[in-house]
Amino acid sequence: MTELDLISLAEKAVENLKHKNKTLALAESCTGGWVSKLITDVSGASAVYQGGVCSYSNQVKTDILGVKEEALCSFGAVSEQVAIQMAEGVKKALKSHIGIGITGIAGPLSDNTAKPVGLIYVAIADESKTNCIELRNNFTEDIRLQNRMSAAETALTLLGDI
C-alpha cells in the first residue's frame, strides 16, 4: 500500500458517501488525523465530511468523544470497546451519519501494556449498527508508518463498502 493507493481509496470513499448522501466524522488516535487529511485531499469532500477529532489523549476521548472512564480502565485505550465508543461519540458530537474511531499502537515503542505493537482497532458506526475490525500487524520495516497506513487503509475501505 502506497500513499497514492490511500488517496485512491479516499476518492472512492468520498464518492460513495456522496452517492449515498451520507456524512462522515472521524475520531483518530494512532493515525493522528491522517485519514482526515486523506479525505480532505479529495476535491468536494466538504459535501460529506463533517470534521474530525484527533483524540490522542484519554482526556480528549472522555471529554469530547464521551468514551467512558470504565472502558479505559477495564480494557485500555487500545481496545474494541474504546474504538466503538470513539466512533459512536464522534458521530453524535459532529451530527454525522457515519463515525469512525481508530485507536492502536503504531510503534515501534509499545504503550507499556502487554498489548503488542501493531494492535489497532477501527470501528465504524452508522445509523443502525457499529462494527469493529481488529488489526494485528507485524511489520519489520517502517513499523510506525506501515501500522498507520494499515489503519488508514482499513478505515477508507470500510467507507467504500458502506
Image (spheres, helix red, strand yellow):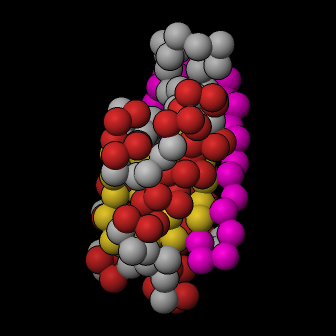
Residue 122 appears at what percent x and percent y? Answer: 60, 48
* Residue at the spot 67% in from the left edge and 76% down from the top edge: 128
Q: Is residue 117 above or below residue 16?
A: above
Residue 8 visible in this rendered orientation of the protein: no
Q: Is residue 70 above or below residue 25?
A: above
Was residue 131 drawn as part of the magenta stretch in this picture?
Answer: yes
Residues shaded magenta: 126-152
Residue 15 appears at what percent x and percent y? Answer: 48, 80
* Residue at the spot 48% in from the left edge and 12% down from the top edge: 109
* Residue at the spot 37% in from the left edge and 65% down from the top edge: 93
Count all numbered tags in the image, as a single digit: 0
Residue 51 appears at what percent x and percent y? Answer: 31, 64
Q: Is residue 159 left or right of residue 30?
A: right
Viewer-proximal residue among 62 and 120: 62
Viewer-proximal residue among 87 and 135: 87
Q: In this view, does 128 lie above or below 100?
A: below
Q: Is residue 24 left or right of residue 73?
A: left
Residue 43 visible in this rendered orientation of the protein: yes
